[in-house]
Amino acid sequence: MLETLTELDGLRARVAAWKREGLRVALVPTMGNLHAGHFSLVELARRHADRVVASVFVNPTQFGPDEDFARYPRTPEADAEGLDAAGCDAVWMPSLDTMYPFGVDGTVQLRVPGVTGVLEGAHRPGHFDGVATVVARLFNQVQPDTAVFGRKDYQQLAVIRYLVRELAFPVGIVAAPILREADGLAMSSRNQYLGPDERPRAAGIHATLQAMRRAFEAGEGVEAVERMARGRLQAGGFDVDYATMQRADLSGPAVPHAPWVALVAARLGRTRLIDNLEPGS
Ligand code: PAF
């Protein structure tokens, strides 16, 4: 039976009691509005720990001024029901004051160098600093042994791994595969913003990523692959932020015979979607 925790003392007491019993605790951080993709993270967490805590907190510090913080969907009751059904043990739902006791302007803000300057970081300045800031707090609050993050947010995963290493958090990071709809669209809370005419077209992102893989594996150069991908997306009605073939560690353009990742961020109307494809996925 899922326990809903909203106060730090209650959370700490619950996790401490589990740890006294020698149980391993996993954290699944989320911003709520949960879907099957999130529930698969809970299931994966179960395989790495004895108890699973999911956090639900829409984090203002990772949204830019023109982004969708105010209209980001908040569905706490449905989230709790879904987490219960997915076998989650507790949900951590802190208020804004609990997460940021001195207010958002008074927060100790982390700044993560390197990988945060490109791709999503270039298009959403400050986004990853906000993610790192809240994830560091979640780790301090929950004190999990392990935490699960989705591969859909590829660059976020890289930032979290960097954060854990840099600040020596004793937390193992588990990367969860991307869950897709039948037509290939990666599951995301933002998909519900898509209008009925946009929804079928949104699958074009995954089809483009697959075309990028085929072209790159057939020996096309990175620039040609990226040009093809951008053209394809634009023909499908997308405004493209990036469509790129990168080295797996995001240190620069992909090279043949080395680990790579194809990444896309593009808008359909007002909805910004991101997705990626790794070899073998
Ligand atoms: O991936 C998300 O939903 C968020 O960026 C996270 C990790 C929960 C931090 O707010």
Image: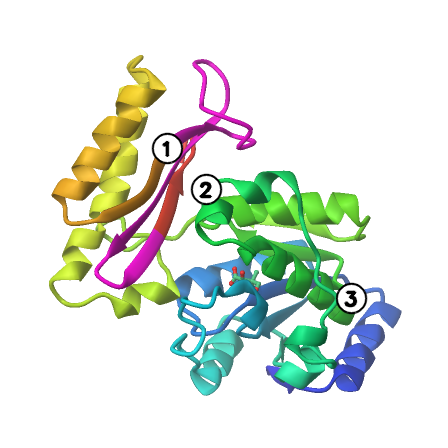
Q: Amino acid at mark 3?
A: Asn
In the picture of the structure, the residue carrying the numbered disc 1 is: 244
Residues at marks 1 and 2, CA–CA distance in whole angstroms:
9 Å
Q: Amino acid at mark 2?
A: Leu
Q: Name the residue: 43% across, 33% down.
A: 278
Q: Is residue 96 left or right of residue 186?
A: right
Q: Name the residue: 68% across, 80% down.
A: 103
CB-based contact (under 8 Å), mark 3 and mark 2:
no
Q: Position of residue 138 (x, y in %)?
A: 70, 67
Q: Quadrant of the C terminus?
A: top left
**From the viewer's perspective, is residue 45 above or below residue 276?**
below
CB-based contact (under 8 Å), mark 3 and mark 1:
no
**Which stretch appears magenta?**
244-273
Q: Does dot 1 land on a helix, a strand or a loop?
A: strand
In the picture of the structure, the residue carrying the numbered disc 2 is: 119
In the picture of the structure, the residue carrying the numbered disc 3 is: 140
Q: Amino acid at mark 1?
A: Thr
